[in-house]
Image (cartoon, rainbow, N blue to C red):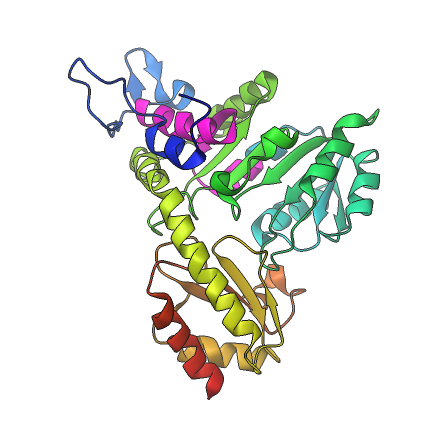
Amino acid sequence: MNESWSARTRAILAGRPDAGDGNPANAPLVPASALGLEYSREVGTPTWAAFEEAVGALEGGTATAYASGMATATAVLDLLPAGATIAVPVYSYAGTRGAFDHAQERGKLTVRRIEPTDTDAWIAAAGKVDVLWLESPTNPTLDVMDLDAILRAAGSGDRKPLTVVDNTFATPIGQQPLGMGADVVVHSVTKFIGGHSDLLLGVAVTARDDLSTSLREARTRTGTTPGALEAWLALRGLRTLGVRLAEASKTASLLADRLAAHPAVVRVRYPGSGAMVSFDLADADAAERLCANLKLIHNATSLGGVESTIERRAHLPGDSHVPAGLLRLSVGLEDPEDLWRDVSAVLDG
């Protein structure tokens, strides 16, 4: 793999079988529970390996795939000693925050919550906590954290916390946190990498051999192994991540501009790139009415698929602190003018 190639090119080429000698052009689907005398839960399968090689090539480390994004987060938590202190963004994925809260309730963690954009507070925390769990852009408020400054501070102090970056929204096409100094990068592959709303999968990537070994041991011990079909589908989805993200980002930018100009919209949250747009309406009722009356955009949870989805996040128990009128829009690959007509028809009404 030529490191000078772009991420978009590497996403297409990484993890393929060697050319020649009658090898297939694509990694095959291998639904095996054992490989000779080896149990696949312990050693993996060729399908897992191909997917992990591809993601690792994009992020710049060694990848370990898991059955879901939450299984990935749990595996990272398994690295921490009992009583560890973890700093997490106030606004971030509700599932991982719920896992942290559960661990705290059982006396395994102490959780500190910090505003995502309060860089000074994150830098100060770097010398006082055991783990920095970062997410940029954040879910669902799309705050952009100063990862470079925070990771630089974390790596330069006397006390060096474990630094974890949830890179699900940015994707490995948009940013590579390991290159900034992060210890571990995690993805919900269910979202943009898979890209077609047809699988559950997660992945953790690290450039540290000790952490890679521990992450794989955690997968073996807990049995949170990826399915063969899911890994194969995820690798196929990864091949088109570059073009999907580029097209969806163009549409997201257009929609963000038009939403910002509409009098019914209180605030637009868009970091300037990527396929996620969040925007605030006046209140929960207005947001729910919009979701209920859209014809093209699905009122559904999850994100990152070829179809556009929208959701009022504050209705979920874990996101009750999110502004009541905030809507999270995952922009898909539909015609941008069709999407705008769908949204504007309801807003105008």
Front-most of residues 112 and 253: 253
Is residue 91 in sight in this rendering? yes
**Percent x, y of residue 173:** 47, 40
Q: Is residue 260 left or right of residue 145?
A: left
In the image, 151 versus 106, the foreground residue is 151
Q: Which residues are magenta?
A: 46-74
* Residue 150 horizontal side relative to residue 208, left or right: right
Depicted 211 relative to depicted 288: above or below: above
Q: Please indicate, yes or no, whether residue 303 appears anywhere in the rendered image.
A: no
Q: Quadrant of residue 39?
A: top left
Q: Nearer the viewer, residue 348 or 98?
A: 348
Residue 119, x across and y down, in percent: 77, 46
Residue 94 in the image: state x and y as whole percent.
Answer: 59, 54
- Magenta segment includes 64: yes
Residue 320 picture location, percent across and down: 64, 65
Whether residue 50 appears in magenta in the rendering, the answer is yes
Residue 28 lies, with reference to residue 271, above or below; the image says above
